[in-house]
Amino acid sequence: MFIDKFKREDGYYDQDNCYYEDAESFISIGILGFCGCGMPAAALEYVRKALQLVDDVVIWGDRSAHEQWEERKRELFSDDGAEYFMWYFLYDKGLTDHGTSVPGWLTDKGIELLSDLMELRNK
């Protein structure tokens, strides 16, 4: 995991030396700014799916994949507001970048977080 560079024997510590008990807490609270209550694992999975969708578009790389993109978007987002909220959120957190429209592509930070979320999911 990329975030393992923040791991110590008793948990994770960010650059301000704030302590997080585990990887899920570090990502949800320390990186994404969630409060930590409720269902952080479900929220992280939602973020992972959105990051994966953006990453897959880069891999598809051509217009023939448009139908697949639209289908996967409909599966992930209930409406345009939910979709664009996610794209704005990911951009605000420095996980995506864009040229003329969102979602654009993953930044290095977005690629690293997607990798961490995939590993966390597979544990």
Image (spheres, rainbow, N blue to C red):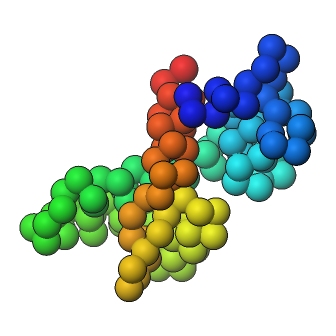
Residue most toward the left? Answer: 64
Q: Quadrant of residue 116?
A: top right
Horizontal and vertical percent position of residue 68: 21, 61
Q: Is residue 69 above or below residue 41?
A: below
Vertical placement of 25 versus 34: above or below? above
Please indicate whether residue 103 sits to the left or right of residue 84 in the image: left
Query: In what quadrant of the picture does the C terminus appear?
Result: top right
**Residue under the point 81% across and 43% down:** 15
Q: Quadrant of residue 93?
A: bottom right
Number of on-image labels: 0
Instruction: Please state the horizontal and vertical placement of residue 58, each as a whole percent of the image.
Output: 27, 59
Relative depth, front residue between 35 and 107: 107
Residue 64's spot in the image, x, y percent?
10, 67
* Residue that lies at the very extreme toward the bottom in this rendered image: 100
Q: Is residue 6 visible?
A: yes
**Please, which residue is most extreme toward the top here?**
9
The residue sitting at 38% across, 85% down in the picture is 100
Is 21 or 84 nearer to us in this picture? 21
Residue at x 39% of width, y 70% of height: 104
Relative placement, left or right, of 38 versus 32 is right
- Give the residue drawn at x 27%, y 69%: 70
Quadrant of the image for the N terminus? top right
- Does residue 121 show up? no
| Residue 81 coordinates in the image, percent (x, y) | 54, 79
Q: Nearer the viewer, residue 3 or 70?
A: 3
